Amino acid sequence: MDRSSRQPDDAFAGEARGELSPRAVQALWRGSAGLVLAVLGTSVLVAGAEHGGRLPVAVVLVLVQVCALRWQVRAPVAVLAANAVTGLTVWALLPAVTLTGALLAAQVVLCVLSATRPRRVSVRALAAMCLPAPLAFGAGGPAGLTVYLLTVVLAWTAGQWRRAQQARMRAEARRAVVEERARIAREVHDVVAHTLSVMVIQAGAADDVFTERPDQARQALRAIETGARSALGELRLLLRAFRPDGQEDGAGEEREPGPSLARLDELADAVRATGMTVHVRREGATDGLPAAVDLAAYRIVQEALTNALRHATGADEVSVRVTAEEECVRVTVVDNGLTGRGSSAAARAGRGLVGMKERARLLGGSLRAGPLPGGGFEVAAQLPVEGAS
């Protein structure tokens, strides 16, 4: 299958909203289950060597805790209660296992609950986890009490840190959307103003030759009709993007209409000047596209190339493909950068990707971006033509 025709998995879906993707949930479960098996499982096997009759029951309880961790994101309160009860039971069966170790799975769930649920809920969970503190004191004295309370508080604090990080990501995503909408609104203003100016000129020309040269007048009227349809499409886009922010619209400023796909080669040449190889492929006619679609496609290519330059580790080649069909325009940008490093992938999930998605969404289209299975990173957008005209 053609690489550009695939819809890549969006590696960053839900990140800006603080949600975990199914892949991240699976990784969290495997990591936490491995931790509990390695620490608590080993402790139970060592401590149960002297209590042969109790060992099988303790092992089953540990496995129950590991299985319950599968739902720690979906139902952290219930999983926390279950793991706390089973952990206390393991400690009662095998007192040689420290209370901190027996409740390790519950502490992991407390961290997840603190990160994903409101603070009032996590504070209550923290208080509940502190209730067994007298047992830790009775078994290990002041040292045992200190270790237990410290691990519980650290688990809750780690979840709060993650929650604050998610809040910052959501605020950054909202700010990026607002800024992108403001930018789109200014560009739409430019295009509409340009189109209306042309319509005024055409109307004056039609009036001058209406009697003497009716064919030329009809041609001018047809141009006015085409321009009016384009302007209406731009105004629809403006209404979708508009958000009252108290800023000046800059109507009195002198600005030229924004760039379009006709200047795609200029954009590619600018990237080639940095030493990166850029392949541009066009399919279909792009000169008759609605201005909103033309501008959005150009901006998506521009942002995708910028991301490849800034964040694609080891990338030295990028392919741009623009396919203009009757119903839609498809834009695909693929680079050959490394995608195995989490920092590189995370860098691509910033405001540029949010802006590209917002442009596609306002036109009624879609955009997906993510690493390819065979290496490289792909941005694929589909922009409908009919809704923008």
Image: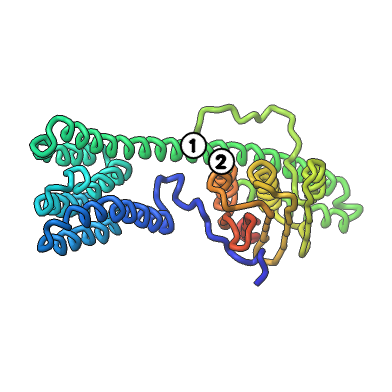
Estimate the spatial distance between the alpha carbons at disc 2 and disc 1, rounded to whole Å.
8 Å
Mark with earlier residue (2, 1): 1
**Relative height, residue 200 to residue 212 (above, below):** above
Q: Are marks 2 and 1 in contact (CB under 8 Å)?
A: yes
Tell me the tag on residue 157. none
Which residue lies most toward the front here? 50
Q: Nearer the viewer, residue 192 or 79?
A: 79
Quarter of the figure with the C terminus: bottom right
Residue indicated by mark 1: 172
Label 2 CA crowd tier, 10 Å (few <14, some 14–19, many 20+) = many
> Could you say which is closer to the camera, residue 326 or residue 378?
378
Q: Position of residue 136 (x, y in %)?
A: 13, 38
Q: Residue at x 61, y 30 (%)?
A: 249
Residue 60 visible here: yes
Q: Position of residue 302 (x, y in %)?
A: 70, 46
Q: Amino acid at mark 2?
A: Arg
Q: In the depicted view, which residue is nearer to us: 342 or 387?
A: 342
At horizontal 72% and vertical 43% (from top left) the residue drawn is 196
Residue 202 horizontal side relative to residue 235, left or right: right
| Residue 228 shows up from this direction | no
- In this rendering, position of residue 26 left or right of residue 75: right
Q: Which residue lies at the image location 20% right of the left edge and 38% below the top edge?
A: 126
The front one of 36 and 275 is 36
In percent of width and height, residue 264 lies at 78, 49
Q: Is residue 17 above or below residue 168?
A: below
The residue beneath circle 2 is 351
Q: Amino acid at mark 1?
A: Glu
Choose top left, top right, bottom left or bottom right for residue 252: top right
